[in-house]
Image (cartoon, rainbow, N blue to C red):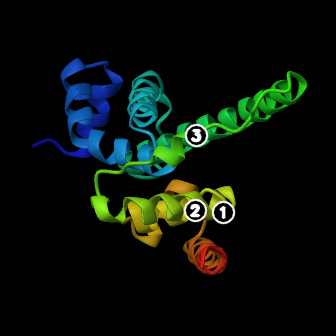
């Protein structure tokens, strides 16, 4: 078994077997990270593939300031958030087109069809509600919360991925939990 530095050197030499090894070691974690943000299997698969293409294309810029896994997580989070931002811009434009055409801008979104492999069937409805509320958090709160609660990363790892301090991560997660409690309390109160 080779160490991380040897793998990085082989990746920088464009060794296809090293890239294959990296993908095999990281693909499930990266896919699940993307899925935690995007809530759609196809989008998560496509984004995970983009992540590995980016890793392959930009491995020469990797500076060893964090672990390779942390760097890849950072790319996965960035790519996922870019897709979310793109979709929000596109959705706003579609809304204005629908209003102009007197059409119906209401459609079922990907998050309404949310499925995650770690969610039991009987909990899918509650999970969809939870992830809808998570999507309302600020981008940084959402990132910290998903990396900690969904992906199980430690605060230090999240700080490395987000390029911030551990105390900032603790604060983001605390604020995310507080917001989610309020949002979910209001949601369930309104439902009853």
Q: Which residue is mark 1?
A: 137
Distance between mark 2 and mark 3 Cα atoms: 18 Å
Mark 2–mark 3 contact, CB under 8 Å? no
The numbered dot on residue 134 is 2
Q: Nearer the viewer, residue 16 or 192?
A: 192
Q: Residue at x 40, y 70 (%)?
A: 154
Q: Nearer the viewer, mark 3 or mark 1?
A: 3
User: Considering the numbered disc 1 on the image, is that residue within a helix, a strand or a loop?
Assistant: loop
Q: Quadrant of residue 2?
A: top left
Q: Position of residue 85 (x, y in %)?
A: 68, 39
Give residue 45's position: percent from left, percent from top.
38, 32
Q: Report whether 91 appears left or right of 5.
A: right
Query: Can residue 98 be seen?
Result: yes
Label 3 neighbour load within 10 Å: few <14, some 14-19, many 20+: few
> In the image, which is nearer the foreground, mark 2 or mark 3?
3
Residue shown at 35% from the left, 25% from the top: 12
Q: Earlier in the sequence, mark 2 or mark 3?
A: 3
Q: Which residue is mark 3?
A: 108
- Location of residue 3 (image quadrant): top left
Residue at (39% x, 37% y) in the render: 41
Badge 1 crowding class, 10 Å Cα cut-off, few under 14, some 14 to 19, many 20 or more, is some
Q: Is residue 64 visible?
A: no
């Amino acid at each position: 078994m080779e160490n991380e530095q040897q793998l990085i050197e082989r990746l920088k030499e464009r060794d296809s077997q090293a890239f294959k090894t990296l993908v095999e070691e990281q693909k499930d974690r990266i896919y699940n990270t993307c899925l935690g943000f995007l809530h759609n299997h196809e989008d998560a698969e496509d984004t995970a593939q983009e992540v590995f293409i980016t890793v392959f294309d930009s491995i020469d810029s990797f500076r060893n300031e964090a672990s390779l896994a942390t760097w890849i997580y950072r790319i996965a989070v960035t790519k996922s958030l870019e897709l979310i931002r793109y979709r929000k811009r596109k959705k706003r434009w579609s809304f204005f087109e629908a209003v102009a055409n007197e059409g119906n801008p209401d459609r079922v979104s990907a998050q309404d069809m949310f499925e995650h492999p770690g969610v039991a069937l009987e909990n899918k409805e509650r999970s969809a509600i939870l992830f809808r509320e998570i999507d309302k958090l600020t981008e940084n709160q959402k990132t910290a919360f998903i990396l900690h609660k969904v992906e199980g990363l430690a605060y230090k790892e999240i700080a490395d991925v987000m390029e911030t301090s551990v105390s900032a991560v603790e604060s983001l997660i605390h604020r995310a939990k507080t917001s989610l409690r309020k949002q979910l309390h209001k949601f369930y109160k309104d439902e009853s």
